[in-house]
Amino acid sequence: MITRLRKYRTEAKLSQGELAILVGFSDGQRRISHYENGKRRPRPDLNDCRALVKALNQAGVACTLDDVFPPDDPEQETSDK
């Protein structure tokens, strides 16, 4: 899963630790780092993705779920519509 989490987090001027606190992740900055670097397994679930996007929006960055977590295969996303 490719994410743009780092891009939007830095746009919000939040550290990884600050974002983790806003979202309520008990394992803090490490979890955000793993999501940004693609090391986290399992991948973030839908609830975590939504919580991250909500926190970024509350921090003043206008973004959607698809902005931060783009579909793995954009071709398939278009053909499903």
Image (spheres, rainbow, N blue to C red):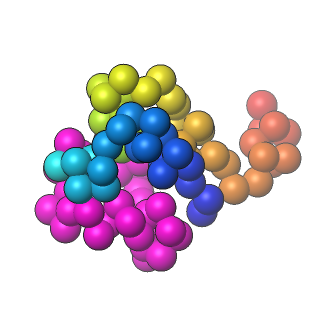
The answer to whether residue 2 is magenta is no
The answer to whether residue 48 is magenta is yes
**Magenta residues, as a range?**
22-51
Q: Residue at x 17, y 49 (%)?
A: 21
- Horizontal arrangement in the rendering, residue 10 relative to residue 72 (left or right): left
Q: Main secondary structure of the magenta part?
A: helix
Q: Residue at x 48, y 51 (%)?
A: 6
Residue 35: where, in percent of width, then height?
A: 44, 63
Residue 52: where, in percent of width, then height?
A: 36, 43
Quick one: quadrant of the N terminus? bottom right
Q: Residue at x 81, y 37 (%)?
A: 78
Residue 45: where, in percent of width, then height?
A: 41, 57
Quick one: quadrant of the C terminus? top right
Q: Is residue 54 visible?
A: no
Q: Is residue 57 visible?
A: yes
Front one among 79 and 55: 55
